[in-house]
Image (cartoon, helix red, strand yellow):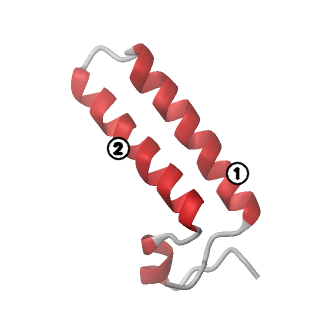
Amino acid sequence: MKKNVSSIDKIVRIVIAVIAGYFAKTGAFEASWISYVLYAVSGIMLLTAVIGTCPLYSIFGIKTNK
């Protein structure tokens, strides 16, 4: 797969992953299913930041890198 995520996009994704992971870990929300969703969001954001490819970007033809 071709890289379609820029450096700034990677940083934003990592920050979102950390924030979502923090809220999931602390149980900031009453419903337990929200924690599972936040863990999933955190994992997906971290994975796409590390590999540099976003499947949704590929589907819609978006590239944030040069």
Q: Residue furthest front?
A: 51
Label 2: few (<14), some (14–19) or many (≥20) C-alpha neighbours in 10 Å: some
Relative to 55, is 10 on the left or the right? Answer: right
Of residues 30 and 6, the one drawn nearer to the viewer in this rendering: 6
Q: Quadrant of the C terminus?
A: bottom right
Residue at 50% x, 75% y is: 57
Q: Residue at horizontal 24%, vertical 21%?
A: 32
Q: How many marks?
A: 2
Identify residue type, mark 2.
Ala
8 left or right of 34?
right
Mark 2 → mark 1, Cα distance in angstroms: 18 Å
- Labels 2 and 1 touching (C-beta < 8 A): no
The x, y position of residue 21, in whole percent, is 47, 31
Question: Mark on residue 40?
Answer: 2
Identity of the residue drawn at 58% across and 58% down: 49
**Foreground residue among 33 and 48:** 48
Q: Which residue is mark 1?
A: 11
Q: Secondary structure at mark 1?
A: helix
Is residue 46 depicted above or below 28 in this figure?
below
Q: Amino acid at mark 1?
A: Ile
Kindly indicate the quadrant of the structure image that contains residue 50.
Answer: bottom right
Name the foreground residue: 49 vs 12: 49
Q: Position of residue 48 (x, y in %)?
A: 51, 61
The mark found on residue 2 in the picture is none
SS type, badge 2: helix
Residue 28 position within the rendered picture, expressed as x and y whole percent measured from the top left: 42, 15
Classify residue 22 as left or right of residue 43. right
How crowded pointer 1 is (Cα within 10 Å; few <14, some 14-19, many 20+) is rated as few
Q: Earlier in the sequence, mark 2 or mark 1?
A: 1
- Residue 45 at what x, y percent from top left? 50, 52
